[in-house]
Image (tube, rainbow, N blue to C red):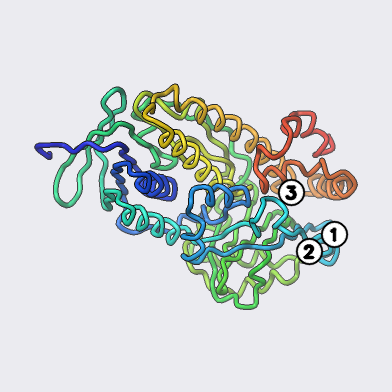
């Protein structure tokens, strides 16, 4: 152990997107930052590559937009919702421009997760953070004297900080050490994802979502012939795409009648792992304690069916960094507004995800009839799409009554 432990203003456990973004922002502000990342190289986690328009606004407010764009960030301009209950021509006639949801944002921003993480980590290091890789965190403690102990190739170390930040993901050891409970709802369906390359003829400006049979398909282009594909399917088919034949079976599932051009994806080349996992939401009632705060997935996450993970994380980073830069008070009382805002934000996004799951990830004749009714009714009454506006423009961009049981009944026609 180091004979004379160093002291920092911030000690951040987890050098993924949230931790590295916060480290860079705070280091630029003149704060001394220790950033500890477990991995030597970032891996494709099959999530975290699409930033909603409201999340792009957060990226801009943090001063990170130009960095991500220079790293290859790719804006998507239009959206098409396909469905087995109508023709591709009818669906494409309702193509939605994605520049309408946030001022001066041309649409969602896509960037490969490993490269995204590395870009932010490198920028944090360049900004002056003491950023370390290949670290095994051994112990964390909050309270009046926050401390972190870790091991790397040079031995065991420890450091003290004014504030400890848990940015260490869903299985957060910081959250566990703080004794902060994680609430989780029951999974509704399975969710799988795969990055493909060599799809040069795919429209790089268009994202799509659709349902046919027992499969909900989603496509998000990254440019240069690369497309991130996702799919929802029934929870009792959890091993549907497992094994060596899984990737091709997943690609074959995109050969749908309601969107005939998607069949071309079956010949694309897998460019990463295929992973399947349960969908669900998780949240903490209070993502902070004396001497510590949680951000990103460590503080709870949203059902991936609506793709809000990065936008949530960037809002977390912006709110926490604003509080820390505002003055010397980094107490739980100072962090309380962050916790209150996040609780309501996640509550609203849980609602939006639940409605979306009921519409897009339930299958069979009854579910198809529900979707057909919804499409017809929403064409006449746009308020039936407020949950979608919350996904794109942000959960605080729509009125509170959009997140009630009454609204859910209106949307689903029950």
Picture quarter with the C terminus? top right
The answer to which quarter of the image holds residue 147 is top left
Q: Residues within 10 Å of mark 1 (few under 14, many from 20)?
A: some
Q: Which mark is residue 258?
A: 2
Residue 83 coordinates in the image, percent (x, y): 78, 57
Q: Is residue 306 left or right of residue 38?
A: right
Q: Mark 2: which secondary structure? A: loop
Residue at image point 46% right, 60% down:
67
- The answer to whether residue 76 is above or below residue 383 is below
Contact (Cβ within 8 Å) of mark 2 with mark 1: yes
Q: Is residue 173 left or right of residue 298?
A: left
Per the image, the residue denoted by label 3 is 363
Residue 43 coordinates in the image, percent (x, y): 40, 58
Q: Which mark is residue 255?
A: none
Q: Is residue 140 left or right of residue 343?
A: left
Residue at image point 53% right, 56% down:
49
| Residue found at the very far left of the displayed protein | 3
Q: Nearer the viewer, residue 337 or 299?
A: 337
The answer to which quarter of the image holds residue 408 is top right
Q: Residues within 10 Å of mark 2 (few under 14, many from 20)?
A: many
Q: Earlier in the sequence, mark 1 or mark 3?
A: 1
Q: Rounded to the nearest whole Å, what is the CA distance between mark 2 and mark 1?
A: 7 Å
Q: Which mark is residue 86?
A: 1
Q: Mark 3: which secondary structure? A: loop
Q: Residues within 10 Å of mark 3 (few under 14, many from 20)?
A: some
Residue 303 coordinates in the image, percent (x, y): 59, 42
Mark 1 or 3, closer to the camera: 1
């Amino acid at each position: 152990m180091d004979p004379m432990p160093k002291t920092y203003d911030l000690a951040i456990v987890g050098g993924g997107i949230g931790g590295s973004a916060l480290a860079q922002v705070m280091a630029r502000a003149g704060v001394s930052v220790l950033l500890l990342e477990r991995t030597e190289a970032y891996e494709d986690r099959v999530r975290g590559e699409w930033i909603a328009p409201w999340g792009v606004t957060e990226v801009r407010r943090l001063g990170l937009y130009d960095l991500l764009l220079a790293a290859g960030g790719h804006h998507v301009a239009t959206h098409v919702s396909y469905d087995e209950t109508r023709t591709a021509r009818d669906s494409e006639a309702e193509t939605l421009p994605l520049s309408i949801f946030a001022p001066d944002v041309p649409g969602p921003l896509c960037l490969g997760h490993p490269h995204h993480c590395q870009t932010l980590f490198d920028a944090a290091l360049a900004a002056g953070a003491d950023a370390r890789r290949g670290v095994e965190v051994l112990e964390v403690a909050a309270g009046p004297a926050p401390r972190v102990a870790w091991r790397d190739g040079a031995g065991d170390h420890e450091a003290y900080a004014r504030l400890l930040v848990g940015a260490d993901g869903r299985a957060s050891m910081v959250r566990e050490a703080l004794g902060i409970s994680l609430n989780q709802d029951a999974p509704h369906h399975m969710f799988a994802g795969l990055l493909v390359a060599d799809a040069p003829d795919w429209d790089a400006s268009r994202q799509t979502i659709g349902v046919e049979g027992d499969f909900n398909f989603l496509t998000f282009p990254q440019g240069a012939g690369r497309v991130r594909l996702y799919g929802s399917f029934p929870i009792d088919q959890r091993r549907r795409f497992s094994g060596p034949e899984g990737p091709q079976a997943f690609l074959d599932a995109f050969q749908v009648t309601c969107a005939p051009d998607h069949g071309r994806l079956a010949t694309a080349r897998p460019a990463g792992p295929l992973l399947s996992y349960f969908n669900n939401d998780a949240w903490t009632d209070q993502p902070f304690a004396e001497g510590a705060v949680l951000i990103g997935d460590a503080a709870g996450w949203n059902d991936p069916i609506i793709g809000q993970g990065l936008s949530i994380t960037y809002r977390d980073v912006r709110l926490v960094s604003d509080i820390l830069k505002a003055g010397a008070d980094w107490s739980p009382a100072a962090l309380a507004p962050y916790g209150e805002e996040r609780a309501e934000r996640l509550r609203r996004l849980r609602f939006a995800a639940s409605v979306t799951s009921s519409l897009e990830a339930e299958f069979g004749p009854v579910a198809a009839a529900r979707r057909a009714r919804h499409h017809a009714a929403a064409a006449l009454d746009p308020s039936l799409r407020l949950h979608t506006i919350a996904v794109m423009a942000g959960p605080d961009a729509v009125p509170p009554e959009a997140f009630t049981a009454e609204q859910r009944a209106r949307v689903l026609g029950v």
